Amino acid sequence: MSKITPAELQKHIKELQSRYDSLVAREKKCATFTVTIDENVEAARPKFDILDNFDKLVDLRREIARCKHALSVFNLSTIIPELGLTIDEVLVKLPMLKQEVERLEDYKNRLPRERVEPMRYAPTKTPEYTYINYKLFDIEEIYNMRSDALRTYQLELDKINSTATIDIDLEKI
């Protein structure tokens, strides 16, 4: 057993996935080949053992699944002390919080009163204005609170991903 950080395990999973993708790409290229009627088929045949390739792909898939499972168990069982939430809970809440901050930012950046540009095909002689229907101060306050929460979630997640460790044997494939 070796101890590695979740960030290191995620990099290992990406490396395994890259090797898997490369083998699949090579398989697609070598599974068939084309020769002219005059060429020697055996001389033109690329060196490729499809059964060996299948075995390597099975081994890589098994190792990727094992590593992802270890990471999943870690995320489900590790509580970030500063937040009182598991890593999994934070990973679920982060995209929702990010979406909320983006929506609030849109409201925060609006002008209290903005002139509506007339449409080219239906111009009006009287200027029209769009007004916000909320207190800008309230939105800015909520935006600041939610964006601080987002930043805290991200920083705490980064911290635990680079300091906590997972016990796992990384197989040499």
Image: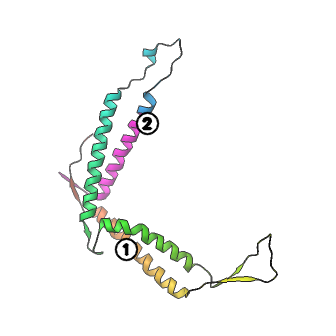
Q: Position of residue 107 (x, y in %)?
A: 56, 78
Dot 2 alpha-carbon crowd within 10 angstroms: few under 14, some 14 to 19, many 20 or more: few
Tell me the residue at 51%/18% (across/down): 35
Q: Name the quadrant containing residue 47.
A: top left
Q: Position of residue 45 (x, y in %)?
A: 43, 20
Q: Magenta residues, as a range? A: 1-26
Q: Does 83 appear above or below 32?
A: below
The answer to whether residue 6 of the structure is visible from this angle is yes
In the image, is 10 to the left or to the right of 109? left
Magenta includes 123?
no
Q: CA distance from mark 1 to mark 2?
A: 41 Å
What is the residue that sits farthest to the right in this orientation?
125
Q: Name the quadrant containing residue 4.
A: bottom left
Dot 1 alpha-carbon crowd within 10 angstroms: few under 14, some 14 to 19, many 20 or more: some
Tell me the residue at 43%/78% (across/down): 146
Callout 1: helix, strand or loop?
helix
Q: Does 46 appear above or below 118?
A: above
In the image, is 99 to the left or to the right of 133? left
The answer to whether residue 5 of the structure is visible from this angle is no
What is the residue that sits farthest to the front in this orientation?
122
Q: Identify residue type, mark 1.
A: Thr
- Magenta span: predominant SS is helix
Question: Which residue in the protein does label 2 denote?
Answer: 25
Question: Which residue in the protein does label 1 denote?
Answer: 152
Q: Nearer the viewer, mark 1 or mark 2?
A: 2
Q: Identify residue type, mark 2.
A: Ala
What is the residue that sits farthest to the left in this orientation?
1
